[in-house]
Image: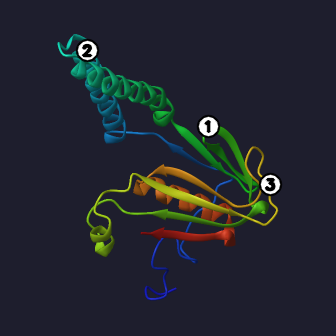
């Protein structure tokens, strides 16, 4: 194969790749994906408690009611965020085999046999100012998605029959490459590639 005939990218048909019996993708948060949710929750909690205390000690009655109500609502939201953070920051593992993709979706075990899959696509957007898509959507996309379109009448234990499953994962190039490798290796012709938005 000459250079001109070589596939343009690692996801194109004909690109060189090795093959293993099992491929695991471990999703761990790091850096800003840990710091931002924790800092945001702490700021929200401090603001809510501060408004609540200010409302309780306020001299006039109208200021007291507003402070207590707004502070109470913000405090309740931040307590909810405190409950969600451990789930959001917990590592998740997806395992690709010849028979199925196994992992977790919305806190429940997931096993998708390749025989039940019509097509698989990965949608992501590279971080940074790249191309015209940056002008249309200048904020960074935190998530990339693995979309699994099921065959008509297919049933996946614990999930609605038919339809499409969307597996979110951190929008990082190594994870996109790893998911694409697993899909291309084990899903075969059902894998439609990586769509960079």
The percent coordinates of residue 81 (x first, y second) are 42, 30
Q: Is residue 46 above or below residue 85?
A: above
Q: Residue at x 54, y 57 (%)?
A: 179
Q: Residues within 10 Å of mark 2 (few under 14, many from 20)?
A: some
Q: Which residue is mark 2?
A: 53
Q: Residue at x 24, y 22 (%)?
A: 62
Q: Residue furthest right?
A: 153
Disc 1 secondary structure class = loop
Q: Residues within 10 Å of mark 1 (few under 14, many from 20)?
A: few
Disc 3 secondary structure class = loop
Q: Is residue 192 above or below residue 111?
A: below
**Cα distance, mark 3 to mark 2?**
52 Å
Disc 2 secondary structure class = helix
The reply to whether discs 3 and 2 touch (Cβ–Cβ < 8 Å) is no
Residue toward you, 133 or 58: 58
Judge from the rendering whether residue 82 lies leftward or rightward of residue 58; answer left or right. right
Q: Which residue is mark 3?
A: 155
**Cα distance, mark 1 to mark 3?**
18 Å
Q: Residues within 10 Å of mark 3 (few under 14, many from 20)?
A: some
Q: Which residue is mark 1?
A: 107
Which is more N-terminal, label 2 or label 3? 2
Which is more N-terminal, label 1 or label 2? 2
Q: Residue furthest front?
A: 61
Q: Quadrant for residue 116, please give it.
A: bottom right
Q: Residue at x 56, y 61 (%)?
A: 181
Q: Residue at x 76, y 51 (%)?
A: 156
The percent coordinates of residue 166 (x first, y second) are 59, 55
Q: Is residue 27 above or below residue 3?
A: above
User: Which tag is nearer the camera, tag 2 or tag 1?
Assistant: 2
Which is more N-terminal, label 3 or label 1? 1
The percent coordinates of residue 79 (x first, y second) are 42, 24
């Amino acid at each position: 194969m000459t250079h001109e005939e070589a596939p343009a990218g690692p996801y194109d048909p004909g690109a060189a790749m090795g093959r293993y019996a099992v491929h695991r993708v471990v999703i761990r948060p790091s850096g800003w994906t840990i710091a931002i949710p924790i800092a945001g929750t702490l700021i929200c909690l401090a603001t809510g408690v501060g408004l609540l205390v200010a409302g309780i000690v306020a001299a006039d009655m109208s200021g007291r009611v507003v402070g207590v109500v707004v502070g109470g609502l913000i405090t309740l939201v931040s307590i909810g965020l405190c409950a969600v953070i451990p789930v959001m920051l917990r590592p998740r593992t997806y395992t690709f085999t010849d028979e199925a993709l196994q992992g977790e979706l919305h806190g429940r075990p997931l096993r998708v046999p390749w025989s039940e899959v019509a097509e698989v696509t990965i949608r992501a957007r590279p971080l940074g100012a790249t191309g015209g898509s940056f002008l249309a959507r200048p904020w960074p996309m935190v998530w990339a998605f693995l979309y699994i379109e099921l065959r008509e009448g297919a049933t996946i234990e614990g999930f609605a029959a038919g339809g499409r499953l969307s597996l979110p994962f951190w929008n990082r190039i190594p994870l996109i490459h790893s998911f694409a490798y697993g899909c291309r290796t084990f899903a075969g012709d059902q894998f439609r590639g990586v769509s960079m938005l």
